[in-house]
Image (tube, helix red, strand yellow):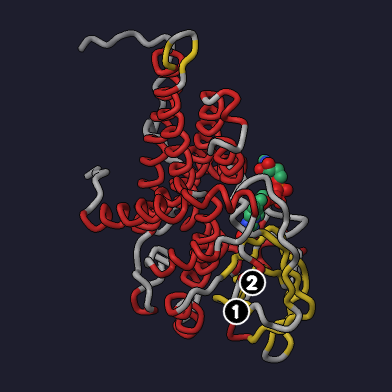
Amino acid sequence: MVDFSLTKEQLELQRKAREFAQEYMIPYAHYYDKTGEFPLPIIKKCWEAGLMNLGIPKEYGGPGLGVLEQCIVVEEMAAGCAGMTTSIYVNTLGAEPILVAGNKEQKEKYLQPLTEDLKFVSFACSEPGMGSDVAGIQTRVKKEGSHYVLNGSKFWITNAPHADYFTVFASLDPSQRHKALCAFIVDADTPGVKTGRPVEKMGHKASTTSSVVFRNAKIPEENLLGSEGKGFPVAMKTFSMTRPAIAAFSTGLARAAMEYAREYVNKREAFTQKLREFEVIQFKLAEMFMKIEASRALYLKAALATDTEEDSTVPASVAKAFATDAAMEIASEAVQIHGGYGYIDQYPLEKLFRDAKLYQIYEGTSEIQRLILGRHVLKDYEPAMKELPKWVNMKPPDF
Ligand SMILES: Cc1cc2nc3c(=O)[nH]c(=O)nc-3n(C[C@H](O)[C@H](O)[C@H](O)COP(=O)(O)OP(=O)(O)OC[C@H]3O[C@@H](n4cnc5c(N)ncnc54)[C@H](O)[C@@H]3O)c2cc1C
């Protein structure tokens, strides 16, 4: 059965997240965008409202919600402020490798505290020299007695300066590429672990991004996630779990851009008419609406697959690639509809435009999603037509 309706509980969660975004995010989004301050008071409120760390299972103190519910919440919050939502959601990304590959002790020690107090976890995979090519990780790890020793640098790590711990990907031997990757939990106060200064970004100013450097950082062997050499599938599975949410982020941002544009065309006049009277403007709004509806349908499908199927790589990539491109196009058109006012910071559009760009980059770029999907079409995709009928020279049969 195909059913896009939300349950009573899901609708209630959506209402709660929408109200949170309207009360605590939108009124302060401009301030945090201008100052680049970390929006700690907002994140604290979000944690207190029970809208953070949603995927942590009940047995570890969390609400144990599925990816579908997380996406519903994320769409609402990203319509409020993309940067704040990234700061909030990155705990889910950081904790995911533990959910994917952690044992009971690791889950108790590292997931439970996220539900008892406001704590931060960051996902440390990308490096100064690689992002897309996860198998190309250069951070080195070596076993020494009952410890692993980490050396190397991570870059672009969201919330790093605030993190209580990191999930880190490192290699036993970079020449062995994906076969040598390992995943670890690394406490931020481990000697030899240092975070860098936040980098200045185009958008998502309310999220902090910095490097993390490991210099002979000794990690207890019990902090290895899964087994040695199995870090690559942990990273890939993590992305399959979290990419539907990036599509939901994009849907929320795009929806906000369309709603601001809708309001503007009802007020602004040109050539003695309201902008809304011009068919070209109506067509732009129609395009926005179609893409938002399609993005939402795709993230719901991907989230459902993530919650129910063994491998949701393909629907997750479809949703991420489509919705992130759509958000960028919609944000751009919403700026256009606002004319000059779309280009200045007295209206929200220029922020939405800057914020949208990141969705096409992080958690696997738009090109990487297409790489995954192109390979799928050529390799695993099962054609509906097993044998393609001959196209020419067929005489109609005598039915
Ligand atoms: C604000 C921000 C926050 C981030 N947060 C995190 C985080 O918390 N944790 C983390 O680990 N990472 C994080 N990242 C890193 C992010 O995931 C990477 O930037 C992203 O994966 C791209 O990697 P790259 O920047 O090294 O680009 P590259 O991999 O060098 O790619 C450069 C360009 O080449 C294209 N390209 C690369 N390979 C191919 C190919 N095979 N075929 C076609 N095109 C290709 C890419 O699509 C891109 O357009 C963050 C990045 C930003 C900007």
**Residue 197, picture quadrant:** bottom right
Measured in 3D between alpha carbons, the distance from the residue under mark 2 to the one under mark 1, in whole angstroms, is 7 Å
Check disc 2 and give the amino acid type: Cys
* Label at residue 280: none
- Identify which residue is drawn at 47% across, 80% down: 113
Q: Mark 1 points at which residue?
A: 224
Q: Which of marks 2 and 1 is nearer the N terminus?
A: 2
Relative horizontal placement of residue 390, taking residue 138 as reference (left or right): left
- Residue 254 spot, x, y in % from top left: 47, 38
Q: Give the camera-side residue of 144 and 83.
A: 83
- On the question of residue 69 being in view, the answer is yes
Q: Quick check: 115 above or below 394?
A: below
Q: Which is more toward the observer, 3 or 351?
A: 351
Q: What amino acid is found at the position of numbered circle 1 in the picture?
A: Leu
Give the percent coordinates (x, y) of residue 240: 49, 55
Find out whether the residues at labels 2 and 1 contact each other: C-beta distance under 8 Å: yes
Q: Residue at (27%, 11%) from the top-left corner?
A: 397
Which residue position is annotated with label 2? 182
Q: Is residue 132 something that shows in the picture?
A: no
Tell me residue 317's x, y (percent): 50, 46
On the image, the x and y values in percent for residue 368 come to 61, 45
Image height of 272 relative to 316, above or below: above
Query: Who's the residue at 64% across and 55% down the image?
Result: 36
Residue drawn at x 44%, y 42% is 251
For residue 366, what is the image quadrant? top right
Crowding near the residue tagged with mark 2, few <14, some 14–19, many ≥20 C-alpha atoms within 10 Å: many
- When the figure is inspected, residue 100 is found, relative to residue 321, above or below; the finding is below
